[in-house]
Image (spheres, rainbow, N blue to C red):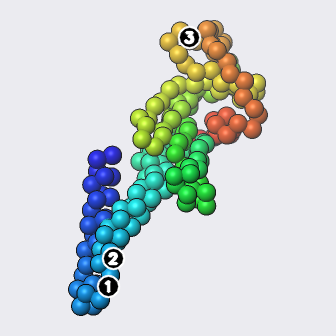
Amino acid sequence: MLLEFIAIIAAGFGLAGIALSINIALRRRLPQWIVPAAAGAGMLLMAVWFEYSWLDRTTATFPDGVEVASTNQTRSWYRPWTYVVPLTNRLIAVDHRFDRRHADAPGQVLTRVILAGRWEPTRQYGAVYDCNAHRRADLLDDVGLAEGGRLENADWVQLPADDRVLRKVCDFRP
């Protein structure tokens, strides 16, 4: 966040410097407000670029085997440009490097789910997806593995059959 703030300030100074140079080259024929307006425009454009490039910059850091399953897009009145192009501020990804299937329960997949949000810490947790029954169980402290690959003390959450994360987990084949 601090580096983004410094980059936004630098963009303001940079665009103000360009406007000042153009004004000097034109022998001060431009209005006096052009330099501060250029600084403000530079800072605003840099902030907008940081907001819209967040998803690509974040997913570029993911290792091979991590697949984005779902994103959240938002619109805000104080960001009127988001009504034209919505802003992505959160994502759910599946880390297929940790996928495991039990021989006695082939319809269930153990995987790691990654939750990332703009201005939020990234969180990871383990989950078991039952591809046949369209449900999910988060692996909390009291969940254990019983005979035959069955989960003990699991709270199953029913999911729609077309849930994006469920589909990414169940349709993945290494």
Residue at the spot of label 1: 30
Q: Which mark is residue 142?
A: none
- Judged left or right of residue 144, residue 25 is left
Q: Is residue 107 left or right of residue 21?
A: right
Q: Position of residue 53 (x, y in %)?
A: 46, 56
Residue at 35% over, 70% down: 37
Seen from this angle, which residue lies furthest front? 32
Res 113 seen here: yes
Residue 31 place in picture, x, y as percent: 32, 82
Query: Residue 51, how many percent across, how many down?
Result: 46, 53
Which SS class for mark 2? helix
- 23 relative to 151, above or below: below
Are circles 2 and 3 on residues that touch, CB within 8 Å? no
Q: Which residue is under mark 2?
A: 34
**Residue toward you, 110 or 3:** 3
Q: Are marks 2 and 1 in contact (CB under 8 Å)?
A: yes
Tell me the amino acid under the disc marked 1. Answer: Leu
Neighbor class of circle 1 (other Cα within 10 Å; few <14, some 14-19, many 20+) is some
Q: Are marks 3 and 1 in contact (CB under 8 Å)?
A: no
Q: Which residue position is annotated with label 3? A: 144
Disc 2 versus disc 1: distance between alpha carbons?
7 Å
The quarter of the picture where the C terminus appears is: top right
Which residue type carries mark 3?
Gly
Q: Could you tell me residue 4's position as x and y percent?
A: 33, 52
Q: Is residue 13 left or right of residue 103?
A: left
Q: Nearer the viewer, residue 162 or 100?
A: 162
> What is the C-alpha distance between the residues marked 3 and 1?
72 Å
Nearest the eye: 121 or 153:
121
Please state which of the two labelled residues, at mark 3 or mark 1, is closer to the viewer: 1
